[in-house]
Amino acid sequence: MDEPIKRTDLNPYDTEEVHEGCGLIDGPGTHKESYHCNACGAMAEEIQRLTRQNIQLTETSTRLQDLSRLDPLTEVLNRRGFQEVLTRECQYAQREGRHFIVLLIDLDNFKQINDNMGYDAGDFVLKEVSRRLCSKLRATDYVARIGGDEFMLLLPKTMPAEGAEVAQKIRMAVSETILWRTGTITVTISIGLAIVKNPIRSINELLAKTHVALVKSKEAGKNQVAFDSKEEEERWQKRQAFARGLDLLRQGEDLLVVWQPIVRLDTSQIIGYEFFSRSPLSGFEMPDDFFHLASEANMLPFLDRLCFEKCVQSTLPFNPSLQHHINLFPTTLLAMPVEDLLNVLPVDRPTRNYCIELSERWFVGNTVEFVKAVHRLRAEGLLIAVDDVGFGHTFLESLILLNPDRIKIDAMCTNGIAKNETKRHALERLLKIIGTLGSEIMVKGVESEEDIVILREMGVQFGQGHFFKIPVNPA
């Protein structure tokens, strides 16, 4: 056994002997018994006490640091805290090549609340507005109070349209009545929205950028959302107008249908008409516009089916022996039962007189189910045409699988072909490829007699375009 040593750092009246290094003592009566010495116990307690103090100091320091970053009234970020967030998010955005959205919010007529109801009411309103702001944001968004009644919000990884939607939700949430003691308070806010694409060093720079939009909001009558970018504001206004019109479109209100003749090129005989949908909404009249936004609103199949029904109804005044071409999105065939489309067709007319046009631009990945749906339509007697061939990359495999009755070549391949030798040679090669399928060939974009002569020589059977008639409303 090791020789015990005397501890000189212990209480002088403590004569217990301690083993060096191992912390054991020679207990009374036997050297085989081991006990913790008083010194080691005291040392352990001291270590525990110091550890607890260190934890408490760390927690206190963290709380103080947090308090230095927070507004004491509303408990959202203050200017210092928001500056840290701004610096960090600018670095992230620059590194990842993206932008973020900032909203500058000012309470309308807030001074009247303080003057008429007192500062207690004003403080209560500020706290309630802060709560409502936070309730409409994601966990990754930031809220700061940067002035008396001004707040600033930072929305990372947010597109302008998304930021505008958030701003509108916030505006409506804040405008709800606030209960105050025995009465109520009504508050509105004006919001300036800015898109931050380049690094901004300070809140003052950000204020300068967003304040322009905030002033626009105030000048528009307050309780508004305004953009710092005219282009983005116009785009948002168009989206808002379309959103208001979607309710009308859901019921088919004011949905328009126009038609254009399809002509046999060798005899100039009209063999049928193509029917197109048009929206009554200003700025969204053309299909590419209103169908695109309908797609963003997740209602493309519904709207497409509604347009299909309207087009079918518009065919009824026409000679039943003529061909009626109506467009459908391939996604619509996948989104709803084929029977829903068949039930729209009139029972007193042969289905063979209806031709469903499917744009090659919108062909989807689920080829098997898509082909099944097309074959189901063909089994009911409808003709199938593939539209917009040659618009981009033509997929010969899809054409082979669908085996369409007609192939319609896009206008960009044919318009002005009489004066464009390069375009003429490209069309000749395309016609050789698709000619092996045995489908009837149609072209769009016929603008002149000279074009017709060239197309006839190439063996194109049918055509349509402004040369014959621009799309008009049958009414």
Image (tube, rainbow, N blue to C red):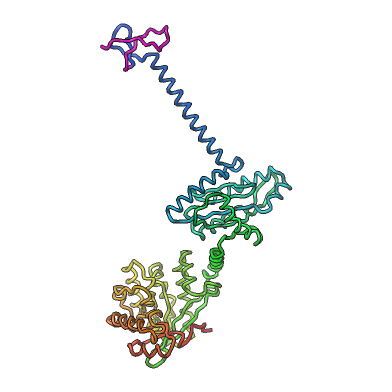
Residue 201 in percent (x, y) is at: 52, 50
Would you say the magenta stretch is mainly helix, strand or loop? loop
Q: Does 136 appear in magenta?
A: no
Identify which residue, 128 or 370, lies in the foreground: 128
* Residue 402 visible (yes or no): yes
Q: How many marks?
A: 0
Residue 287 in percent (x, y) is at: 47, 74
Residue 60 in percent (x, y) is at: 52, 32
Identify which residue, 9 or 473, lies in the foreground: 9
Compared to residue 36, the image places residue 103 above or below, namely below
Q: Residue at x 32, y 13 (%)?
A: 19
Identify which residue, 96 or 193, lies in the foreground: 96
Compared to residue 144, the image places residue 40 above or below, namely above
Q: Residue at x 50, y 29 (%)?
A: 57
Residue 179 in percent (x, y) is at: 66, 47
Q: Quadrant of the N terminus?
A: top left
Q: Residue at x 46, y 23 (%)?
A: 49
Compared to residue 461, the image places residue 218 above or below, namely above
Lateral position of residue 109 relative to residue 193, left or right: right
Residue sitting at the far right = 116
Residue sitting at the far left = 1
* Residue 247 visible (yes or no): no
Quadrant location of residue 400?
bottom left
The span shown in magenta is 1-22
Q: Does 11 appear in magenta?
A: yes
Quadrant location of residue 81?
top right
Q: Quadrant of the C terminus?
A: bottom right
